[in-house]
Image (cartoon, rainbow, N blue to C red):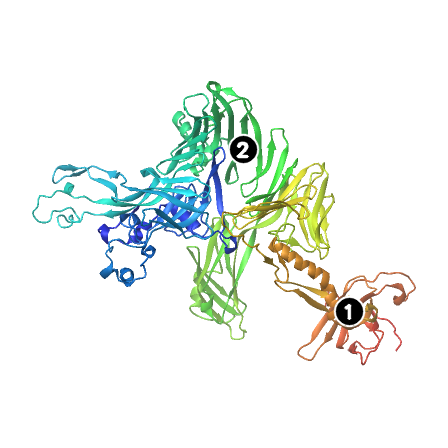
Amino acid sequence: MFLFTFLFQPIFSQSMLKYDTPSPGVGSLLRVQSLPVDLHSGRANIAIPLYSIALKNYSYDIQLLYNSEGNKVDLPVGNVGLGWSITGGQIYRVANGMIDEVYTFNEYMDRTANTNWDQESNLNKYYNPFIYNEDYLHEPDLDEFIINIGKINASFFMYKDKEGEIQTRISSQNSSYFKVKDVKVGKIPDVLLAETEWTNAHLNKTYHPKLYIESRPVLITEITIVDSEGLTYIFGGDINSIDLSCAYSKDPDYDSHYSVYGDQIGSHSMIWDSFHSSLLATASTWHIKKIILPNQENLTFNYDKGNVNIVERFLYTDHDSIHETEEYEYNKYRLLTCTRKYINNPNDNSMLEARTKYISDLMEEYDSVTSGSISSGSPLKVYDTMRAQGLLSYPVETVVKRNGKVTSAEVMTYKLSDQFAVQDKQYKLENDVPLSDYSSFKLLNSAQYSMDNRCALEMEYLDYDSYGNPANIADKAGVKTAYIWGYKGLYPVAKVVNARNTFKSVPQYRDERTTKYVNLKYSSLSANVKSYNFYTSKAGDVEIVLAGALGFNWYVSGHLDNKAFNLVQMRSSDNMGKPWTDYQNAYTYSATFYVSAGYHTFSILSTDACKESSANVYDGDIHFSYWTRKSIAPETSGTDDVFYENFETTHLRPASFGYHSNNSCIGPYTVSLVTNPERKYVIDYQVFKNGKWEYMKHDFVNGRDSINEGVYPIDDVRVYPKDASITTYGYYPLIGLRSATNERGVTESYRYDDFSRLVSVMDNDMNVVKEYDYFYQNQSVEPELTYYNEQIRETFTRNTCDASLGEMGESIDYVVPAKKYSSTLSQEDANQKAYIDLRNNGQQYANEHAECNSNIIVSVYNPMEQDYYLTFDWGVQGSIVTDYYEIPPSRKIADTGDVLKDYEPIKVYVPRRFYRDTRVAPQDDHWAYEEPSIKSTPYAFDINYNIEYYTGHEDTYVIGGYPFAY
């Protein structure tokens, strides 16, 4: 594993920082591990477990880790991708000045251990080394080493003391204890990097230049670490286990003998082969080579071109040791194609071999035995499409062999779903079969594939959502399971067994003509020069018409795409002379162009206009018509069995907390679902009442149901068949599962620490049923993280006013300030406490602090058969305000001929003030207003309802007239 830094200058003059260039994989890991993982700082801990190597009492995990801090465009890409690294275990060096092993490591540099360290003769050697430091060639800055393996993730320094013992100084806080047991220093063999053949035609001579990676004469080749549990880790040891940082070093004598073009300078006998340029290498990273347990069980890692290909395990029993080996094979795309596991002898029958065939292998096999491409109509076209799209890592078949038999096999077929290549069917071998009798999956020709006929259908993927996630799956018994995905398609949020969603709504459109009107400014002709983009739904005519304006002459020139037009419209009665007569003779008022479907541009390049002497100034008009697409009723098919809404992305007056989630809904909520008429359904949901979440459930009929719990938040709305089994899930994105709720509404929830580790499991009542603590040796206990509520407010209206006297309560805001409540569970739990405060105290606060305003109770009789508006005008001249009251038809209750006895009035509350006038008018004809008859006054103007003029609190109005006695 090599990384090159090319410098066209002598090695002794380069910056020591060049030693700090890590390989891409190690560099990505270094950026992740050099800072603490803290989700609250915005950086997620993203780790994918790859493999776990197990011994008797020990396991070693290999993970794929991503640096979520972002990646610069010039960062090198490692074997596993930009920003990704394999946490298999390594030590990385950050060189400070000259690397330690050149001089310092084997020399005692810590003068503070001397009894006379504070004497002037010793201190001078630090602050004035050029004069006093007899160790001037020994640079005193120790290199920093960063280690990542097992429980150890730390930065440390190492050196030898005056007794020659290796000392370890751990600089990272809260790190597990470990020490450097041994360091081997030696020469790393040179590596031939490139070799070529080159012929000089002028000299008629052939050269064979070679470029070697030459390591420094003294380098650290192996580092042995022992941790607090007695585990021994050996890093490096051979060239394949060490990363080298290289710098190009050109022979310093070359420039004085040859030019950059290879021409000889002066007279000499030196030939090109006499000069030696090289890549000078320094060890920068040591990868884990061996792990030894206290009982001498051990793991050995072998590396080949950066990829682990053999892991050897020595297992010790009570009687003897067992040498267990795992071998790995990869294809040219670095995909693991074969894993072999055996003990002691690779040739005995106990060897277990698992072999995987990928899309890349399948298509290479097809190309080698079959000629001709796969046609677009073939069901096997999906495999050719996957290859073309680079989907080479999709597994097709996995076969496990042992003792001359195939013990298990799994085959996956694929299909195209919209723009995705997706899984189609999964087959499994149900019984052992002889290896010689097993038929592997392959493409026979462009239209047919074959597999072993003993592989039975295990699972079929029926439908997919718009993100390419499976939406409906059928198992081998034919039982269908529906899945709903949330969080932008990243996580399954609902799983319903014995259900399937098949409803589809396909948008439908109708082509029709539309016209776009453009206003032409007469007062500013230059302002008319503009371009307008539009879209035609199908090929057809675009008709441009210059309408101009009455009393005006208009001329317009322009382009439709790259086609020119000139239009004139003469609507002035005056004789304008030239150029208008020329325009009229040359052009007309319209133009038509045939265009294809798609985007087009209508451009006005210049305009001219004049008006007749008697005309007022008006703007002109030009318009163009084209084909557009109008949406019509969609085409629907199928039915749905499942509906689920958790309000995490649907914000309908959301609350700042939810049922094991971030949000919920306050107010009415309606569910509509096209259900199967042959099945019966239920709807359930959670509602937050009395300081806790309550589970509600009832029948869902006729495909529609409305939930209205008033001011109480609702969450987790679910519809599903009565004979189905549903489980819904909530998540902490990028962390893990947050909650799981079954068909009885019972929920189990989970909490994690800052390192995404599970710390507690809670039951439906939030009681902790399981708890996990993570502590390293000598690690202090971290205080629990405290969450505080966000500020919430709501408007409450006083409800203790006497409505019979015309009193109405005014409104006032009740505010729960931020950080009034706290929680060690979650932010939502703290917000939930604040919401309980709001519900418990908001109304009482309004009753104690809001006022009761005084109103007139106006009984309005509307014997008409239509809706009216009752209006009141008030205010000062120039600032008149109109209040509107809707008056529906009064219900008739008798037939005496007296309006006041025959109809029930509509009561409205009118604030006490002076009104300039009052009117009534039909709601569909505001101009047909009239004056109502008013019991308190014969006039419909200057109505003074202020308390000092009108001591009563009621009045009566009649629409259509009434003979009140005054």
Q: Amino acid at mark 2?
A: Asp
Asked if 887 appears above or below 70 in the picture, the reply is below
Crowding near pointer 2: few (<14 within 10 Å), some, many (20+)?
A: some
Image point 71% across, 60% down: which residue? 839
SS for callout 2:
strand
Disc assigned to residue 264: none
For the residue pair 465 and 861, the one nearer the viewer reads as 465
Cα–Cα gap, marks 1 and 2: 66 Å
Q: Quadrant of the C terminus?
A: bottom right
Please name the residue that numbered disc 2 is placed on.
Answer: 424
Q: Is residue 271 visible?
A: yes
Q: Amino acid at mark 1?
A: Met
For the residue pair 92 and 706, the one nearer the viewer reads as 92
Q: Could you tell me residue 283's position as x and y percent?
A: 31, 45
Disc assigned to residue 808: 1
Earlier-in-chain disc, 1 versus 2: 2
Side of 849 relative to 363 (left or right):
right
SS for callout 1:
strand
Side of 184 relative to 499 (left or right):
left
Q: Is residue 28 visible?
A: no
Q: Could you tell me residue 306's position as x and y percent?
A: 36, 38
Asked if 851 appears above or below 429 in the picture, the reply is below
Mark count? 2
Q: Quadrant of the N terminus?
A: top left
